[in-house]
Amino acid sequence: MKNLVIGVDIGGTKIAAGLFDQQGNFMARSLSHSHAGCPPDRVVEAVVETVDSLLADAGVTKSQVEGVGVGCAGHINYERGIVLVNSNLPDWHNNPLRDTLNSCLELPVLLDNDANCAAWGEFRFGAGRGSRHMCYVTFSTGCGMGIIINGRLYRGATGTAGEIGHTIVNPDGPLCSCGKRGCLMSYACGMALDRDGHECLKCGEDALFNNLCGDCKEHIPAEQIAEAARQGAPAALHLITTAGKYFGIGLSTVVEVLNPDTIVIGGGLSHIGHLLLDPCIESLNEHIQPVLVDSARIVMSELWNDAGVLGAGALVWEKS
């Protein structure tokens, strides 16, 4: 087994990557936004450029690298190395991303869902160390989950286990990016906060909210809504609290169905803090059987943006 791997985390707006050893020590790191909104061919080019840059920065040759682990948002068929569908990136239906990158990089490539990779990263290097049954749940642009059962990553029959963001919490709810109505993600993620924030602006009933967020014509960053909530804008407080409550409903499903010993919460928007997490935990406890209250240790990510990169790379060793 070679001592070095490369991990790549492909998101809707960024590609994060790193070259590191078996202890999780980075030799080189990279963050790029050049592929945002681009079709698959440009994303592949960006990943190749990123890998070449990492190797050059570290003074490492491909012969010293075990392989490249790639985490990508969306429904991923792990065994076939295919992106089945990705609602955050255009034109990704049934895309053979693993084999394409394998050919371009001339290195072994492993492809998995980004939440699975982040889960493995936290399990091996972060907040999930020492657990046996762990779930990693991300609250970011979207909402996803990775599942560890008996110390093994669980992917399901087609590799798409953990897609909690597309479980239905209200069949008559808002339209989700996947085309269904009432998904958890249509209430509890950055895209939902953006949508509902614009509705609040149209109503114009909260002058402070309009003053703080009214200059956002096309996109209202969730962080900006959170800041308006911290300043006491009633509409913003309602938006964040509602998102937190639905996120808690999602976690209640996790506890009832999977009974984990640890739930790690990550993703950029979990940095919103207690305004989001207090109603989340209250809603979680309200929607589970009383005997299960406190059955799972709820902790925040230790690795944050590095979780997906470290997990994706570390999974290469699992295949060695």
Image: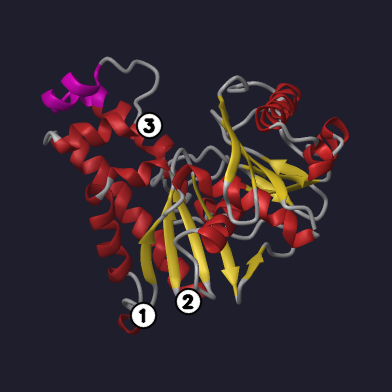
**Residue 158 visible in the shown view:** no
Q: Which mark is residue 292?
A: 1
Relative side of 18 to 198, left or right: right
Label 3: few (<14), some (14–19) or many (≥20) C-alpha neighbours in 10 Å: some
Q: Report x, y in % for residue 251.
A: 41, 63
Q: Which mark is residue 195?
A: 3
* Most common secondary structure along the magenta stretch: helix
Relative side of 217 to 38, left or right: left
Q: Is residue 211 magenta?
A: yes
Q: Amino acid at mark 1?
A: Leu
Q: CA distance from mark 2 to mark 3?
A: 33 Å
Residue at x 26% of width, y 22% of height:
202
Q: Earlier in the sequence, mark 3 or mark 1?
A: 3
Q: Amino acid at mark 3?
A: Arg
Given residues 37 and 21, the one toward you in this image is 21
Residue linked to disc 2: 259
Q: Report x, y in % for residue 24.
A: 58, 52
Residue 71 in the image: above or below residue 301? above
Q: Earlier in the sequence, mark 2 or mark 1?
A: 2
Q: Amino acid at mark 2?
A: Asn
Residue range in magenta is 201-214
Q: Secondary structure at mark 1?
A: helix
Residue most extreme to the front: 59
Q: Report x, y in % for residue 118.
A: 55, 52
